[in-house]
Structures are given as C-alpha cells and as structure tokens.
C-alpha cells in the first residue's frame, strides 16, 4: 500500500529509469548518434539528454540553489556542452564514443539524484510555495508534475526510438 504519492511515483520511476539506461547501454555509439529517420538533426543521444537535462534543470530550480548537476559535478567538461544545449543541437550527431559513455553516466547520475531527492525531501518542504512560479505553486506539485509529465512523454519516445534503432520491440519489464 502506498502511503505517500512519492512512494507511487518512485515505484513507477525506478523501473522506467532502469529500462532507459539498459536501452541506452545496448545501443552502439553509431546508433546513439545517428540521425533519426524522419527527424532531421535528432539523435537518440540528444533525446536521452533532453530527459536528464530537464530533470537537472528542475532540481537546480527547486532544490539545488540554481546550480545544475551538469555543472556542479563537472559533467559539462566531460560532455562538451552546457545545460542550455537543445536536444536537436548538431553536436549530438557527432559525439565521440567517450562523450556517449559520459552521457550515459550523466543520465544515470541524474536519475539516481532525482530518485534520492524525491525519497528524502520532507513532506513539509513539498508543501512550501515556490516563489517565482505562476501561482507560488507548492514544490511537490512542481516536482512531481514534471517527473510524471516529462518521464511519461520522453520515456515512451526513447523506447520507440530504441526499437527503431535496433529493429525490435523493446522489452518492458
């Protein structure tokens, strides 16, 4: 029985993150950076970054005093781009093998941090209004709504792209 909405979100989120990391790990470097059919300028690598970068920006705004994990932990140095890089930037079509490996590690770190923050943040803090938002929305609403909306949209998209790239339907645990 779930006692808190966070329990339900985490129970759903963890296997999705695991599946996405497994799919990214199963792709070759060439597959990850190849231009997607019907999507000029887009690569799986860019879309994978888009989900993790969105999480990172959410955490920066809500709990990390404006600092992204990409910059805080020097992932930007390893990856060669910053938090403002759009997912359709041509650099995702030309990542080196080392950058693709670093991107997978960055995404794993972001997924783990998002899960840890969600599990540890006190319920009282989730109820606090966040200044500068549309209606001073509570942190919990912003955090969980982004997680649910962002993950449901992008996880499905990434799994579909994976299926196209490897030529088979993804295994859903």
Image (cartoon, rainbow, N blue to C red):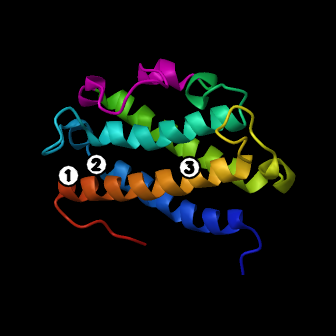
Sequence-wise first label, 1 or 2: 2
Q: Which residue is mark 1?
A: 165
Sequence-wise first label, 3 or 2: 2
Q: Eyeballing the image, is 149 above or below 134?
A: below
Please report contact status of discs 1 and 2: CB closer than 8 Å, yes or no.
yes
Q: Eyeballing the image, is 65 above or below 152?
A: above
Which quadrant of the figure contains the C terminus? Answer: bottom left
Mark 2, Cα crowd under 10 Å, few <14 / some 14-19 / many 20+, is: some
- Check if residue 17 falls in the magenta segment: no
For the residues carrying marks 3 and 2, which lies nearer the camera in this image?
Answer: 3
Q: Can residue 121 be seen at all in this image of the molecule?
A: no
| Residue 66 pos. (x, y %) | 67, 26
Range of residues picked out in magenta: 74-94
Q: Which residue is mark 2?
A: 27
Q: Residue at x 56, y 49 (%)?
A: 146
Q: Eyeballing the image, is 67 above or below 119?
A: above
Please report contact status of discs 3 and 1: CB closer than 8 Å, yes or no.
no
For the residues carrying marks 1 and 2, which lies nearer the camera in this image?
Answer: 1
Q: Residue at x 55, y 28 (%)?
A: 70
Kindly give the residue lying farthest to the bottom in the view shown.
1
Q: Can residue 83 be seen at all in this image of the molecule?
A: yes
| Residue 134 pos. (x, y %) | 64, 39
| Residue 135 pos. (x, y %) | 69, 42
Disc 2, SS: loop
Kindly give the residue lying farthest to the right in the view shown.
124
- Check if residue 77 falls in the magenta segment: yes
Q: Which residue is mark 3?
A: 146
Which residue occupies the foreground of this view, 139 or 66? 139
């Amino acid at each position: 029985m779930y006692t808190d909405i966070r329990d339900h979100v985490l129970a759903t989120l963890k296997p999705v993150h695991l599946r996405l990391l497994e799919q990214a790990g199963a792709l070759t470097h060439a597959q990850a950076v190849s231009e997607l059919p019907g999507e000029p300028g887009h690569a799986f690598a860019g879309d994978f970054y888009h989900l993790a970068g969105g999480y990172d920006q959410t955490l920066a705004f809500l709990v990390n005093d404006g600092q992204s994990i990409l910059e805080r932990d020097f992932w930007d140095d390893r990856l060669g781009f910053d938090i403002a890089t759009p997912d359709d930037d041509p650099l995702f079509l030309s990542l080196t093998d080392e950058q693709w490996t670093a991107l997978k590690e960055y995404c794993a770190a972001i997924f783990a941090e998002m899960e840890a923050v969600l599990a540890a943040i006190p319920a009282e803090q989730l109820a606090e209004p966040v200044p500068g938002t549309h209606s001073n929305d509570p942190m919990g609403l912003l955090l969980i709504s982004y997680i649910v909306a962002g993950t449901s949209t992008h996880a499905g998209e990434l799994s579909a792209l994976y299926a196209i790239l490897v030529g088979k339907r993804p295994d859903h645990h």
